[in-house]
Amino acid sequence: MDPVYPRTQKIASDYQVIRHRRHIGLQQLMALSASASTILGPNKSFKFIVGQNDDEAVLACSAFRLLENMDLTCAAGQLLNEAVQSHQKIYKTGSSTFMFMVGAWSSAVLECLRQDIRISLIVPVMSGGLELCIEACKAHALPIQDIYRRISWRTKTTDFPVDHLSSVRSDDFTHCKKSQTVLKSVSPVVVSSKKSALAESEVTLHKEQLKLNSPLSANLKNNKSLQNCLKLKHSRHFSVKNLEEPLLCRGGPNFVPDSMCSSMFFTYLAQSLCHGCSHAIRLVIDACRLQVKLARLKEPTSGALTAFDVSKLVTFVYPGLSENYSCVTSGFISWVLADQYVLAKSFHGQYLRVVFINGDATEKYRHVGLNNTLNVKYITDASCLEMNTEESWDCRTLAALLKLKVNLILIQGITSTRYVETCVKHRILVVQKVKHEVFKDLAEATGGIPVFYFSQLDESCVGNGITVTLWKTTLNKEFTALKITTSSTMLVTAFITSPAICKLQMLEDQFWTCAHRLNHALTEETVLLGAGDAEMFCLMHLESLVEEDPAKLYEAIHKHMATANLVSMSEDAMQYTRQILQLMANGWRDYISTVYYNSGLCTTKLKALTAISEYLSKKEKHVSLFSHFTPNVLGCDNDGKPTCENTGNAEVYDNVTVKLEAWRGALDLVMLVLQTDAEIVTGYVETES
Amino acid sequence: MSRLEVQRSALRLSDPLSDGRTQQQLCELEQIFASCYGPCGQLKQIHNNRGGHIQTTSTALVLLRGVPVSDPLLKLLCASVLNHISRFSDCGLFTSILSCRLIQSALQLNFHSSTIVRIFKHLLGDCIRYLNSDSCACKLKIDFNSTQVLLSLARSIIVSKPACLLNSKEVQHVSCLLLKAFLHTVPCHIGGNTLLGKTIVYSIEGHRAEKSSLFPGMLLDLLDTCPKFVHTKLTSRSIKVMVFSASLSGDLPEGVNGGVEACTGVSPEAVLLESLLNLGSQLIADDVDLLVCQKVVHPALKQQLKKHKMIVVDRLGHALMEPLTQITGATAIASFQTAVPHKCYGQLKGLDMVSVASKRLLHLIPFEDSCVYTLVLCNRNETTLNELKIACQTAEHVLKLTLKDPFALLGGGCTEVHLSAYIRNKVTSEMNCELADLDCTATEYMVVARCFCSSLEYVARALDHEGRECLIDLSHGHKWIVPSNEFIGCKWSDLVTQCACGSIEKSNRMNWVVLDGNYDTFSPKLIENIQMENIPECIILDSFAAKTNALQVAVETASLVLDFKHVVKDVN
């Protein structure tokens, strides 16, 4: 057997060539990705990354943070890091899937190589197979319209039966009455011959899911069966407190299936996308509700879905308070120096005038691009010595601000404490280090124009309508948190707090992940069924292709063969294709079993793998994977519920593009590393013989 | 007294090629290049041992720039290959492999190096004469009335870089875009000052290659918020453009080197700012719509111009200045302190904001006869995008070279094998006339010629990395590959279907022999039926100009290296 170690050749003093026998690169990828296996699924395990020399520790629970903080010495590790970071930058979520699939497919490829399958066959077969699976998944994706119909149908049929009124609060009573009238107008549509397409689908859903034979209208009088419905669909959604807001869409004959502005549907969708980050998704849902409210103030006809704008979300991190204090608020929150506390309090309730300063507010600041190499010699006579240019700058700028009656300066950069003191004395608040997006948004909302220098300021640059509030109590003697907002802004800040400071970054990351997952789902208007369903679908699709439609498979593979005329599909190639696709599918099996193992639904991965094989052999294509994996099948001890914080949803969803692009990116990386046969390390000083 | 060191005298190394280390390094370099060659080539990762950026590549350009070589002979070899790449862009790996191979096989021979060099040069002359002649059987004339040959040429180049990870649909799409860009850059009217147009490449990472597209004119990235008044500029009149190459950021002009003396109360910055604002008022008065500056524009000037609805683009960079002046006809102004003459203004047909693969860019729309196009290239990650950029630049250059030499050579190794068969035939049949000119014996001539031919065949075989058998057919002299490794008991004719370049299908009257250097010489005949109409879709082609020059550079560099007697090295 050949030795496993790379064969290095040290011959030159300028560079060293390391030839990869046994594909060290792929083995390194496998080893690194193994750390991502506990990050999959709803129960994420936190990881501490400790520095060897300085004993600093970082808490990470997502793949990109993990790789960011690790000191990667091998080339394959650096490539993995770059690939994961660039995926994260574009999609903001899905990096753990990416990292896991890199490891899974690296091991699949290594197994192919062990079976002596040549690289020029592995690359096109895997690429072709993945492309076919991705196309099939896209076709299999669920439009969120369908989910909406299911939810809205459920709420209509299980809404407020008369019995329940006693347990309902008085302000909900009027609402119940309203929704009963809603129901009354729906039922004739169902029963009578005026059928709309929606009514028909509602009826079919109704029959399938509840298997009740009598038409809806009869059930309205029959509270018992409605109570049965309630029992069958016992979920947080239908409890009283969630129905504070009226259903924002109007039911009845004018029902438009496209106006998906139901906040209940929104909550449902968000919770099924969050994959266990229930704390973060609660903040995201609150943020969205706030955005809807703000949008309503601007334009009364906008709905929940059109109002959600992830680019207008900001986070503010506050160490020390309990996590229950996390909330959302409009505008943005910033730290200011504590000596502005009294001034800020006095401005409570007033509308302030604001200027926006790009860059720093100091005398020495020059805009980027100015090479200040002016070698200036000042010639003067002794009578007009003006030594202190800074003070004169302060006076001049203050005069300009007072002339314009400005109360607040928002600075993107920094300024000196002395300047802040001077400003406070003249009743001007100063906020530094404002983030760029916030800056731009507030400038637009208040009508101000950002400038670089105070000399550019004039009446047209000043914005109006800003209000300032003190936020929470000052725990810190030096700084105070100030909330700044205006009426026409859509900015919403998520106030994130935790007593454990190391957890703050993680909570912020989770917030953004959930927000972007929701955003992707709403922009694409489709989702994939989660909890391993998409992967299982791909497994079944590949199997069916190999058995029933090999021509389509070979056509896809040929597309990926660069020199198609050189390699004809000989008999062994066809057999190898099957083997390669089998090994590739094992990557997905691994993923599904890891997800189920991590979520606590089964005690060992082996049980999950067995369950998967059983499912495949039964070929029950219409039953979703999640509902198939009952406790009996998985042989687990708890009563069939995942051990994570269950959001009460029956379904788990995934984003389409994020998942498919993660698969593609992962396979690309594995193919690149597979096709690399040597590393050339430069800057190498020869010391050994 | 500071440290003084005794100056050491220079080292003289004689017969540098006989040094074992040099030979080993040469062998190593050849293996690196040979393993990267072709569409099935393996990739190399180049990085510094202290960490830092990793480049994964299989192109000669990146490899030669990234691999530091200190041996003087090998440095010479790398430098001459880099020079070839800078002039022709293509066939870099071919040159390096061929010259390394020639040097190595010449070293095995026991003859005097000057004889070998003479014979090599003579054989090279024969090759070039054959390739340039009309009866050359591995050459195709490009008909500019049909796109098929040009498309095949572009496609062969894109396909030869395996790190791009493109499937055949994407390869087709990118090749079509490249061909379109090339055709657009050829000007329609030949006037006095005609220049070939330029294709600017704008790359976007993270999207599939199918999203690549071609735009006339230029695309600029507006780093600030896109101004809302762009759409109002799409009026019927043309856009007036002012181009500045000087820095408008408030710096002193570049000519001022020494210090500045000023009285107190006078601030040089304020004075400069005032002259900038004066310039601004002149531009506003002249109704200019777009100001483009190569360097930075002072924010106060930007604010003044934006108030009057003028679009300001700064930090353009040096590379885009020339195409910009070509499209607009503007003259770039180098000073802001004097009034701007009216004839320096340029014209554009229009402006637009376009959305390309999730990025919003400002599109400068030129008039119809402009030859500057922007190719937006997308690919999924940084490595694949960089390789695709190099492949596209190579393809663009090669297509431009066809304007001068409208020919293409058959690819896939067929040209090399064909040339080798031709040379073998010529050497055996016309030996007597040559010997007198070359001043060598018959054995020497035969042996060196065989060495030359086997080097050519080695390069052709290097395209296949899986150890498959290569054959040569005894009628046309093309290379054929046997797909599988199990051919015991089969005849060659059962295993092969078409030749490596795709131009010949097998026929009953062909005979094949294994390509290992020992076969009877024959006279390769012309392919009678390779007419324009019969060119197969998936033919693989090489650039004629690039390959002939590559052949010349390889042989001449090898001859130069073989001819070295001494190396003098300064060790201070």
Image (cartoon, helix red, strand yellow):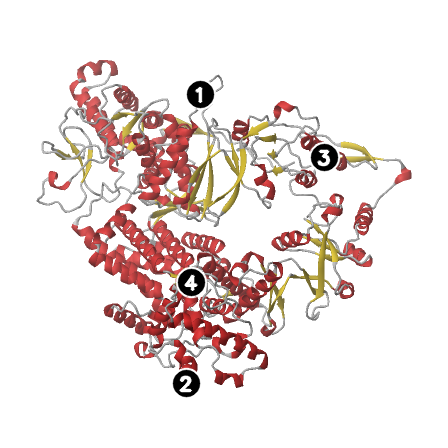
Residue A224 numbered mark, or none: 2
Residues at marks 4 and 2, CA–CA distance in whole angstroms: 30 Å
User: Label 4 sits on what residue type?
Assistant: Gln
| Location of the N terminus of chain A (image quadrant) | bottom left
User: Label 3 sits on what residue type?
Assistant: Leu
Q: Quadrant of residue B248?
A: top right
SS state under label 2 = helix
Query: Which chain is home to disc 2?
Result: A
The one nearer the camera, B442 or B463, is B463
SS state under label 3 = helix
Residues at marks 4 and 3, CA–CA distance in whole angstroms: 56 Å
Q: Earlier in the sequence, mark 4 or mark 2?
A: 4
Q: From where the camera sits, is residue B67 visible?
A: no
Measured as percent of width and height from the top left, residue A401 is found at: 79, 50
Location of residue B288 with respect to A307 vertically, above or below:
above
Location of residue B125 with respect to A535 vertically, above or below:
above
Mark closer to the observer (1, 4)? 4
User: Label 2 sits on what residue type?
Assistant: Lys
Mark closer to the observer (4, 2)? 2
- Number of dots carrying numbers: 4
Give the residue at mark 1. B189
Query: Which chain is home to disc 4?
Result: A
The one nearer the camera, A548 or B30, is A548
SS state under label 4 = helix
Contact check, label 4 and label 3, Cβ < 8 Å: no
Residues at marks 1 and 2, CA–CA distance in whole angstroms: 87 Å
Give the residue at mark 3. B277
Q: From where the camera sits, is residue A311 visible?
A: yes
Location of residue B1 with respect to A255 vertically, above or below:
above
Residues at marks 2 and 3, CA–CA distance in whole angstroms: 81 Å
Residues at discs 4 and 3 both on one chain: no
